[in-house]
Image (tube, coloured by chain):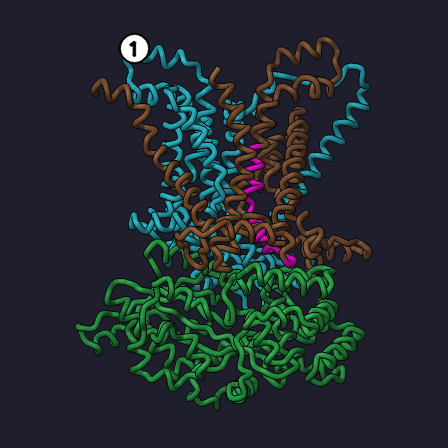
Amino acid sequence: MKTYVLSAASAIAIAATGAAYAAPEAEVLHYWTSGGEAKSVAVLQEEFAANGGTWTDMPVAGGGGDAAGTALRARVLSGNAPTAAQIKGPSIQEWYQEGVLADISDVAEANDWANLLPASIASHMQCEGTWCAVPVNVHRVDWIWANTEILSANGIEMPTTWDEFNAAAEKLQAAGIIPLAHGGQAWQDATVFETVVLGLGGPEFYQSALVDLDPAALTSDTMVAVFDQMRTLRGYVDDNFSGRDWNLATAMVMNGEAAFQIMGDWAKGEFLAAGKKPGVDFTCASTPGDGFLYNVDSFAMFEVDGDDKKAGQALLAELVMGPKFQEVFNMNKGSIPARTDVSLDGFDSCAQTSAADMTSTSENGSLLPSYAHGMALFGAQAGAITDVVTAHFNSDMSSEDAVKMLSDAVANSM
Amino acid sequence: MSKWLQDNMPKIVLAPSFVAVMVFVYGFIGWTAWVSLTRSRLMPRYELDSFIQYERLATSPRFETAMVNLFIFGTLFIVIAMVLGLLLAILLDQKIRTEGALRTIYLYPMALSMIVTGTAWKWILNPGLGLEAMVQGWGFESFEFDWLVDPDMAIYTIVIAAIWQSSGFVMALFLAGLRSVDEEIIKAAQVDGIPHWRVYTAIIIPSMAPIFLSAFIVLAHLAIKSFDLVIALTGGGPGYATDLPATYMYAMAFSRGDIGQAASSAMVMMLVVFAIVVPYLYSELRVKDD
Amino acid sequence: MTDISHTRSPSMARNQSPTVKLVLRVVLYILLGLFALFYLMPLFVMITTSLKSLDEIRTGDLISLPREVTLDAWKTAWATACTGIQCEGVRPFFWNSVLIAIPAVMISTLVGALNGYVVAQWRFKGANIFFALMLFGCFIPFQVVLLPMARVLGIMGIAGTIPGLIFVHVIYGLGFTTLFFRNYYVSIPDELTKAAKVDGAGFFRIFWSIFLPLSLPIIVVTVIWQFTQIWNDFLFGVSFSQAGTQPVTVALNNIVNSTTGVKEYNVDMAAAIIAALPTLLVYVVAGKYFIRGLTAGSVKG
């Protein structure tokens, strides 16, 4: 039924725009397949269709985009690139250097993107002066989620330092509750790791260790302390965490099996999709410490032939940055709009906190790219760090050995 | 049909396959070798650099784990699958009434992709949901089976699932072998009063040497190519404790954007394959040339 | 049991008493039964889980039978489960797999038969080298060929299409199909070909009227092997498809990974079984021919 309505709408739209206009077409490669995510993409698809476009969905799930990355490389090499694909961070510039991305500066300039986006986020979307990608949202990574009922039942406040967190966890453990819901996939270990680096070391340390890869920072005592804290956290996770998906860990917090989860705000999308209310059923707070780690999802457009596809790219870029989409999409997904002029009235308290923090951290220089989510480093370097983090987290390795391994791995990945 | 055409027909028939193999196997191996000497990152590049990728490979603890895992996994998998396959074949060869059904039961895992059965295995092996929870639920509180989440033991769960999948095929090979042993020899042995088990150890099994070789080659091929299995069961985890060279290579090429590194690990894999296959080919073709 | 001749009878040693004989027999059956349980367990878990409701899965245990059998999960998996934003279940992808697997199996089997026939019966100079090269090709890890293959498919203009996927499967199936047929034909005496040649039969005539009629067992083995490999393939499927040509394994992966807060194990399992049904059916129906085919010579190496 829905499809009939949509195609009717697109028929009208086509009629309205006239015959000279090629009907926009887009084949979109993405890896948003979990509940809140899929719902959010559906919003975009509907809007695309309502504007006369034909959206072909090409989802490739699994492994945080690994399989999607495989499909994308194979398709670009074969000269059969999708119209648009979900890629982000420095890999946008890497793809650009391969000469396969389309220039969308026309759309960007016509819509004044430069003034609508925070400077650090706009810089991710530009390749050598041209616009080469369109941001969908800003996820904050350094969030800690809690089951409100468990916290109040055990007399626990949201922790503001890692010591407080550890104390709370001990208390919960004594009460027979799993303190930390965690999924055993390397990127999840990395997510926790970077929030600990930010929390224990502060924004400057984070910048030099995980963005600039300064050897002095990587081998510092602070880094040893970070690994010590990772070892402590390992003790708060249940034994069955290996291989668990992040959203199942979120479900553990929802169902009261576990108290906390450290995860980006896409976890909120899962809470909301399950009908839970922020502040009532679950509580959000930034992880202990200052700063803001961002993870920006974006679409890059690939060089394609055919006016219909080019029209599709222009339409897609315009819609993605459009205020309506930015608002609706991000409400579903748990993130906040990338453009700063969208009213946040309809958003929940967590998103409002996030937006306020983004503005303030942007001013004081502690708005930082997430390494774990491919915003700070090239894949090879980020991967080398993640290898060490996950190897340490899943073994008895000492923190000193981990630090040694970390600096070796980073040097080896250059 | 002209005389020339007729004389050369065999070659003409082989020609497309020959071209295909030269391009799609050897050409691609050559391509990989070339790329392994470059600094290719996100996409392949073709400026030769140095042996830097191999140096990086040599110092990578993760690749070392992957190679050790391949050795543990490959050895256990091949030995156990062969022993189990042979045992099942011999047991089934005892005039079993339900042989047809049993054979199908032993063989069916081969029909399923690990993408399919991985879901079930993951569940069965998960201590909180599967076997361990079930047995504990029966009252055996001290029962423990948490290999899947134990970095030191997780590789053995991969072995279990792989044996489950492939041992039936080995059974089929051996059963076929048992059935094609010359009966006269066996009858003669029985007339001489040689015990039943001795007939197997002294006559039948030695006569199946070529089948052992075939089974070994099939299993070695499966072991080296094992990929779906690891991805579906552990995703290489906990940490990277269950990484194999194939998954290492895949991760480097497709999630890390480190194609040069992937190519060099692929070349190391090809060397392992070479070391296994060449002796086999040598023995195989030497015999046939006689 | 009618399929395999039991002319040989390994008699139990004559000096055993009937009691010992009986005990041995019972032990034998128990052993066989235990192994059968090991092999059946995952399938059993998959089937029972797919027939349970989510509530029952949460409260029940792994191997308990469903208290209430429900086919809802199967219906969902077939027609309405979401793979991304498209919620059409595995149905459309299932047909893609059929369209890929059937031609690919047929072509690779036919070409493999011709190759095997040449290598085994028309041994010209270099035929063995050809065979060795071919065999080595069986071992190439498929991850290695993804990127260059993508380029070649692009040049050929069949990237992302079903013919493209068929092409890839045929190319990388040839090694095994040639191996199977070669090992089978090598045991057929040369005299047959020679006599036919004297009678004036040509290359194809000999193949068509002498070899092909003898080949049923090995054709069955090859078809089963190829069908299983191609149907179950994920790596090529995910790399060389585009929207609309993705095979069922890719859809299955998407379904299993498309979870909301609750993981719908029953739908995952039902989808997994549906994806596996064709190959399962082939093994159950043609399994006995499989062993017969292997017995008929392919394993003699």
Q: Does residue A86 show up magenta in the picture? A: no
Is residue B221 in the magenta section? yes
Q: Is residue B55 left or right of residue C155?
A: right
Residue B266 image offset from top left, x and y in percent: 51, 46
C269 over A338 or under it: above or below = above
The secondary structure type at the circle numbered 1 is loop
Q: Residue A405: where, in percent of width, then height?
A: 65, 61
Quadrant holding the N terminus of chain B: top left
Nearer the observer, C32 or A291 = A291
Colour in which chain C is shown? cyan
Instruction: Give the vertical position of A160 relative to A69 (above or below).
Output: below
Residue position marked by numbered label 1 in the rendering: C199
Residue situated in front as seen by the camera: C179 or C260: C179
Chain letter for the green colouring in the rendering: A
Q: Amino acid at mark 1?
A: Asp
Give the magenta range: B217-239
> Which corner quadrant of the image does residue C174 belong to?
top left
Crowdedness near tag 1: few (<14), some (14–19) or many (≥20) residues, C-alpha within 10 Å: few
Chain B: drawing colour: brown
User: Could you tell whether B89 is left or right of B25 in the image?
Assistant: right
Residue at x 53% of width, y 32% of height: B277
